[in-house]
Image: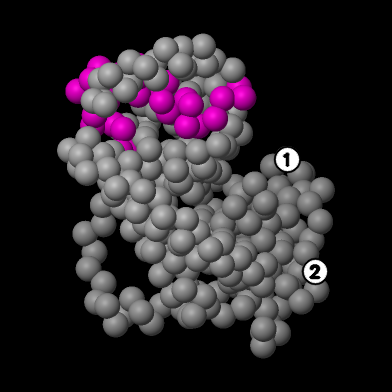
Amino acid sequence: MTLPLFYSIISLLVSNISNPNSTLAEVATDFLVSLPPHDREKAQEKVYRFVRWLGLNKKASNVSPLDINRYSDQMMSPETKTIKSFLVYIYKKGYCKVNLVTHLRVKKPSHKIIPPKQNSQIQTTLTSQGYNELKAELAKLKEQRSDVTEELRRAAADKDFRENAPLKAAQENKSHLEGRIQKLESTLKSATIAGRNQSTSKIKIGDSVELCDLSSGKQLCYILVDPREANLIKGKISIASPIGKALLGKEQEQTIEFAAPAGTFSYHIKKICSPNHGECTTR
């Protein structure tokens, strides 16, 4: 069956898809059908890989900004335009109430050359929770290896390689899976756990810090973490962020001031909790 005929049949099957219960696989098919044949052929591999990464059966309405941020970390530059178009389509068609395209970060190419030996010596400091989360992710990815290999085998069974988009997508999925596994193994191997053998009263990675915003009086609580653990929704801020840099090395009752894209901020450090003594409570 040729691709034009295949998509003509699919078009009839998905013409009524317009509800928030639609899966990403269904919405992706609907999106591809809406494209001109020439654009469709170019987009299908990129869209298929994106949907496979998120989960074929995941509801389009359940895709979160955090999902998009995480995908951005491993997205290849040639995908950007297509994925943006797909996310705009999801939003305009009402599959998702959030305009997810605003959360798609485009990485700028780096021209820095890091010698292999120097790069291999970089150490990572993780919180105990972050370390366990990465271990769990690694175990889950290793379990997926057999499924991905089987998917690749099935896709390769189609001998018409000119129109075998699933094969190319499966090959890319396999490549990214192995790449992520290697990255996690390397990170965990060189990681140290924050708080172990550290008794300083100064703020360090892994500490929970309770702050008072001097302009509003609002109390905030953040946990300083390695950039790999950063998750603003959970109150985990990167030590590489403006506020993270300002807090490192400071002590309780000190006041910090730092500049960020949104302006200049001033905070008073009210309390510091080390990983061994629990976390502060956000109020």
Badge 2, how many Cα within 10 Å: few under 14, some, many 20+? Answer: few
Q: Please, what is the three-letter code of the amino acid marked with disc 1?
A: Ser
Q: Nearer the viewer, residue 96 or 208?
A: 96
Q: Nearer the viewer, residue 161 or 275?
A: 161
Q: Tell whether 237 sits left or right of 80.
A: right
Q: Is residue 152 above or below residue 183?
A: above
Residue 245 appears in the rendering: no
> Which region of the structure is painted magenta?
20-46
Q: Tell whether 66 sits left or right of 220.
A: left
Nearest to N terminus: mark 2 or mark 1: 1
* Tag of residue 278: 2
Q: Nearer the viewer, residue 79 or 148?
A: 148
The residue tagged 1 is 216
Q: Position of residue 234 (x, y in %)?
A: 67, 51
Q: Say whether residue 249 is magenta.
A: no
Secondary structure found at label 1: loop
Residue sitting at 40 percent across and 58 percent down? 149
Residue 50 appears in the rendering: yes
Q: Say whether residue 29 is magenta.
A: yes
